[in-house]
Image: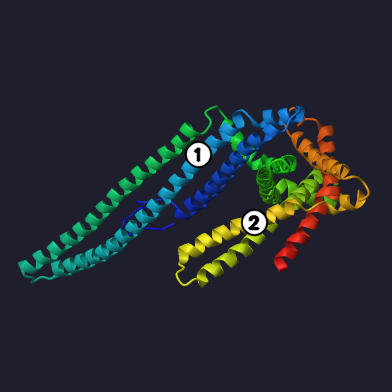
Amino acid sequence: MPEYPYLGWDPVPGSPTAIDALQKKLTTSATALGTAHKLVEQLLGESTHWRGEAATAFRDSLDGELPRHLKNAHRSVSKAAAQLSTWHDSLVSYQATATRYETRAKLDHAALSRAESHHDAVSATSEIAQSELSAATAAVTSAREALATVRAQARELEETHRAEASRIAKSLSEATDRLAPREPGVMDQVLKWIDEDLGDLLSDVSAIAGFLALAIGPVFPPAGLVLMLVATGASIGALTLHLADSKMRKSLKDGFTKGEFDADFWDSAVTLTGDALGSVPGVAAIAHGAKSATTAVQAANAAADSGTLAATVAGGRGFSSGAWNATDDLRQVENPLTEWALQSTPRYVKEGVKYTFAGAGAAAAVTHYPPFDDNESIANTATGVDGARALLDDGPSAAAKAAQAWAALAR
């Protein structure tokens, strides 16, 4: 914290570093809230193609208050982050001004000390002209006035700082009062849910979107491709959040170090495995998109009349095209294990097995929500289903997709 010994007090208290850190955390939270809201809305829209009791239970668990609370919380936290950014910039400016005032006060204080010392020396002289004594007195008065002036300016700065701080505080309060849910405790519940359950929701979104992609893809390929992108993106997000989850890491650590292979261990292990396997197409799409973007930028830069903007646009188009094409190619990769095991069976049997695996994943995801979420037996069964899927379907499929993606990148 800056000190102002010559002004005599700190006219602009506050830590820009701490404010900046909080602002970045709020921005990250706002982004997560916005992503969750978009995924919920998109999934609700796409789930209209899904019929049955499980579909109804899934839509009921996500519909209603949750989308509205997510949207309002996103707006609220975004506004709070913007206000903190403004306050950070203002505080940096105020403290720079206060530092200038402190420098002036230091110089004026030194001048006053010299003037007072000279006045004392002149006053102690027995034979001194009245004009010289008057000049020494005037110098002391002038130095005191200069120091008082800069301190008065610091007082004005302090009032400006206080007024702006009050305005920012009021804006932060309004961000909660006007935009966040008004019911007591709802905002806390939403933020707690985001902190504890967003990763699980993204895992479920991935499973259900993957099933819908399989079901809709043959009828409307573009929609199937979009749903696959949603599924892989959700898996990447879920993997990131679950790896950062201290409870999940602890359950895995206790299993390997203490032999506590309980339900929490298997649930964590299966969840992370599923997230990682589901992320393979997304990582491959990003890699192909990056390769295509690099090629496009190089081609644009080679053009004589190309500029930075043209190269940037070309890179963006190249990335989008490369990621889209890679995703479409990977969507058509079959599970080599089932292809081998069912090689002598009709095609419709293989298709039935494929739908069974995907449908089982979607059904297991639904069990995480009311009215199934409090049933321990159902939860353990869902974990077993996901584990079997990872071993028999997701694992072999991800390996085949990774091999194809790597081969394509190497070309």
Residue 69 horizontal/vertical position (percent)? 57, 33
Q: Secondary structure at mark 2?
A: helix
Closer-to-camera residue (388/163): 388
Residue 263 makes an appearance in the image: no
Query: In the image as oriented, which residue stretches furthest toward the left?
Result: 130
Residue at the image position 77 percent from the left and 56 percent from the top? 401
- Picture coordinates of residue 336, whole percent (x, y): 85, 54
- Judging by the rendered image, the residue that carries numbered circle 2 is 323
Q: Amino acid at mark 2?
A: Ala
Give the amino acid type for the residue marked by disc 1 in the picture.
Answer: Arg
Residue 400 on image: x %, y %: 80, 57
Judge by depth and name the residue closer to the eye, 316 or 303: 303
Q: Quadrant of residue 140?
A: bottom left
Which badge, 1 or 2, is on the more N-terminal residue? 1
Category of crowding for the residue at label 2, using alpha-carbon neighbours closer than 10 angstroms: few (below 14), some (14–19), many (at least 20):
many
Question: What residue sits 33% from the left and 56% below the top?
Answer: 98
Side of 203 relative to 69 (left or right): right
How far apart are the two marked residues, 1 and 2, measured between alpha carbons? 30 Å
